[in-house]
Image (tube, helix red, strand yellow):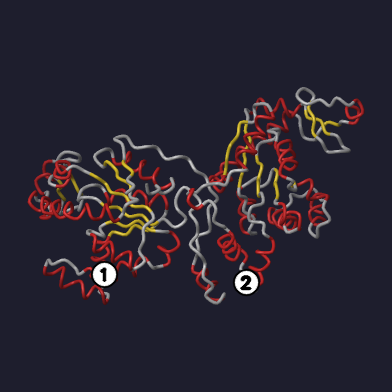
Amino acid sequence: MSRTSCPDTACSPQPCGRQPLLRAPSRAIVTTVSLGHLPLPPRPDRWGSDAKDLCPHPWNMLEGLLIHKPDEPIQYMISHLKQDNDHVPRICILGPPASGKTTIATWLCKQLNTPRITQETLLEETLELTKEVKAFQERGQKIPNALWANLIQERLSNVDCIKQGWILEGFPENRDQAWMLQSAGITPRHVVVLYAPDTVLIERNLGKRIDPSTKEVYHTTFDWPSDPLVQQRLVEAEGISEQETAKHLLEYHRNFPRVFQIYQQILKSINADQPCADVFSQVLTYVQTWCRSAAPFTPRILFCGPPGSGKSLQAALIAQKYNIVNICCGQLLKEAVADKTKLGELIKPYFDSGWPVPDNIVLKLLADRLNRLDCMTDGWVLHGFPKDLDQAEQMERAGIIPNRIFFLNLPSESVMERLAQRMIDPVTGERYHAMYKPAPLPDVQARLKQNPKDTEENIRICLETYYRHAGDLEEFYEDAFYINADQDPYVVFEYIESCIVKPLPHKS
């Protein structure tokens, strides 16, 4: 049996960026129906080494279906499979003026044999929208973001970009352009942002020279050509004065934070104030790495532990950070009774009598909730069930299989300290604790009430029940993680998060 234990000090999670995968809305169901119930295999966890050899084709194809919504989905899938381009580069190189975008993008193109797309190269292409863009330039008008996005979409639909991928240099420049690209279904796999101090960038820009014949960029200090003929035909680049450069930098710093928010999961910032070879080495290493997710594609997390171990708090923190559904089994039963559903009517007599609700009713209610669209697409975190081996086996037979299981361990003395001293204000509903959160005023302290379930006798009964079945559950969930819950809750959360992003432990 493989067991992963938590040290007293929890490990910090590794930073992992990823391209946000499309959450499948209700249209996803419509799509699968219209495709004749074509079965899609479970998506491999892109963060786990145990799935690194699985083919990502089906899910990339599904993402394309959701983005483009083709009239002929079967033909779209056939075309997608013929392209076989799920692993080609899709890279954006961004940064302020004179940060080296052109140099790095050019070197990447040669290294990866991939087309380089810039606003300048787009205007040299014989595309349908090129004339429209040039007309705006001739009139001295600003080119609309939508027109740029459509022009880029037209260029990226060419065979070379489909087969070899693309490197988009200096675009998007602002949030609206990034949104336009996303709306057109253009989603990079890697976004590289080059940065350097403004004083360095201004100095670089002042020395920039361009070869009009080859469009190669040179510099009077850092990169002067050795060929005298090239030296003679070099011209000063437009808009490189100190005032113009400062103006462009100000505009960049105003727009970039919003672009960062859109691409932050797949974005890497690299210091450009170092030799070009070092910058290129870092960029190449990043773009050749498949981005990992900060969580499973569909997280299915289970928390087990004695009462008072912090299952509810940790579930709430995980649900909030990863935008997944927080399922508390006890709360689910109460909601069913309050909503007077059919299952709620079956549950109510057990609530009134104080008897436990039968497992088959609980499992039916739980399965119905976990099979809803939000849980299927966003994932879930469950606590409060199962409480024994039989319930765990029934869950598995019902197809409810978590992919991360955590046992929160807490000494009985700490459980008693946490629960027996909890009180509630019947007027405001505010919860207090004699040690950790005492009542602020004497009159509030005087009216506090204790939940009958929090008496020491009831707590001992609950602990005995839990430990009677804990061993069987630990053997059943042999790939579970074990965490010392007798420490700061946010330290516990950091360790839980680090376990979510690492591969499952292998059985010894």
Disc number at residue 232? none
The earlier-in-sequence mark between 1 and 2 is 2
In the image, taking residue 334 as reference, residue 95 lies left or right, namely: right
What residue is drawn where x is 33% and y is 67%? 397
Percent position of residue 107, x then y? 73, 38
From the viewer's perspective, is residue 371 above or below residue 487? below
In the image, taking residue 225 as reference, residue 282 lies left or right, namely: left
What residue is drawn where x is 26% and y is 52%? 474
Q: Which residue is mark 2?
A: 73
Secondary element type, mark 1: helix
Q: CA distance from mark 1 to mark 2?
A: 40 Å
Within 10 Å of disc 2 (Cα), the crowding (few <14, some 14-19, many 20+) is some
Could you say which is closer to the camera, residue 125 or residue 499? 499
Farthest front residue? 508
Percent position of residue 461, x then y? 11, 54
The answer to which quarter of the image holds residue 186 is bottom right
In the image, taking residue 365 as reference, residue 157 lies left or right, namely: right
Percent position of residue 43, x then y? 50, 59
In the image, taking residue 127 as reference, residue 257 lies left or right, namely: left
Q: How many marks?
A: 2
From the viewer's perspective, is residue 34 above or below residue 169? below
What residue is drawn where x is 45% and y is 53%? 296
Farthest top residue? 221
Disc number at residue 336? 1
The answer to which quarter of the image holds residue 103 is top right
Within 10 Å of disc 1 (Cα), the crowding (few <14, some 14-19, many 20+) is some
Q: Amino acid at mark 1?
A: Ala
Percent position of residue 303, x then y? 30, 52
Q: Amino acid at mark 2?
A: Pro
